[in-house]
Amino acid sequence: MAKSKAGRRRRHLSRRWWLLGVFAAMFILLVYSYGHFIEPYRLEVTHLSLESGKLKSGMIRIVQISDLHCDKMVRNEENLVRLVKPMNPDVIVFTGDMANTLEAVPYCQEVLGRLNARLGKYAVRGNWDSVYWGKIELFNNTGFTELKGATVRLVKDGNVFYITGLPYGYSDRQFDVLFSIPSDGYSILLYHNPDIVKDLKNTSVDLYLAGHTHGGQIALPFYGAIITLSKYGKAYEAGLYQVGGVTLYVNRGIGLEGGWAPRMRLFARPEIAVFDIVPAGGSSA
């Protein structure tokens, strides 16, 4: 009798563990399916309004895209064009990492060429662009001006503003351009990752636009990014930060990291960021 009861208990426990194993496997499959088939295609538009005493009136609209990581498989490229078109940006900026494979470069160039901005389109190279595609003219026929340690001066509604770009792996000479940015207008810096934010103390930079982290690409609820590949770890993993007098925005990017990284996103949706820069007080009249 005792052996019979013990046997039934073991069978009951065995069935319980079997059911738990089945539920665990189903949960893992569900999470993987969402992260692989759904979230990478849920392109989000993030709108931000930033005030500056350097603007007299009107508004400057900057659209930031980052980390396209074009692959042989098309993901968000057509959605990108569809979403940006009605935004009527003054400037579009691309903060690096065009493609994961050389075969995807021509299509990515064609997509970038379909984006329109009134005052121009500007880009910097990311780590993939510099390391793997360093000898390729990535921005040919895209309408984007590649900034290689240079500053451009733009004017809208009597407001002067500057856009400065540094390529990933910049030289000391290229970095020195940051200390010669005029202070008579609003200044925007483009650099692929957030790692130089603490080096901008004696510059005129107002807004620093970066990407690279993908918001972790795979993040956890209440914790956020697991890996950022930034020297500051999770300190600037995604979103808006104020670091001294500089406003930093770290874009989650649009595509998926190439190489060894899993082809999925989890709690780190791809994004386009739209910045409306207005005079202090919030009025754009």
Image (cartoon, rainbow, N blue to C red):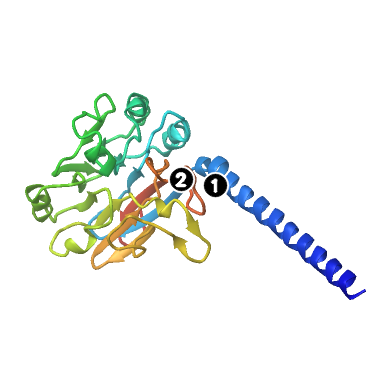
**Residue 285 visible in the shown view:** no
Residue 276 in the image: state x and y as whole percent: 36, 50
Identify residue type, mark 1: Gly
10 Å neighbourhood of mark 2: few (<14), some, or many (≥20)? Answer: few
The answer to whether 16 is drawn above or below residue 64 in the figure is below
State which quadrant residue 64 falls in.
Answer: top left
Q: Give the residue at x 30% y 51%.
A: 210
Residue 45 in the image: state x and y as whole percent: 46, 46
10 Å neighbourhood of mark 1: few (<14), some, or many (≥20)? Answer: many
In the rendered structure, are the residues bearing label 1 and label 2 in contact, judged by CB atoms less than 8 Å apart? Answer: yes
Q: Nearer the viewer, mark 1 or mark 2?
A: 2
In the rendered image, the quadrant that contains the N terminus is bottom right
Q: Which residue is mark 1?
A: 35
The label number, if any, that marks residue 190 in the structure image = none
Q: Give the residue at x 39% y 47%.
A: 274
Which badge, 1 or 2, is on the more N-terminal residue? 1
Judged from this view, the residue extending furthest toward the right is 1
Identify residue type, mark 2: Pro
**Residue 182 visible in the shown view:** yes
State which quadrant residue 150 falls in.
Answer: top left
* Helix, strand or loop status at disc 1: helix
The answer to whether 207 is drawn above or below residue 94 in the figure is below
Residue 121 in the image: state x and y as whole percent: 27, 36
The label number, if any, that marks residue 262 in the structure image = 2
Q: Give the residue at x 25% y 60%.
A: 53
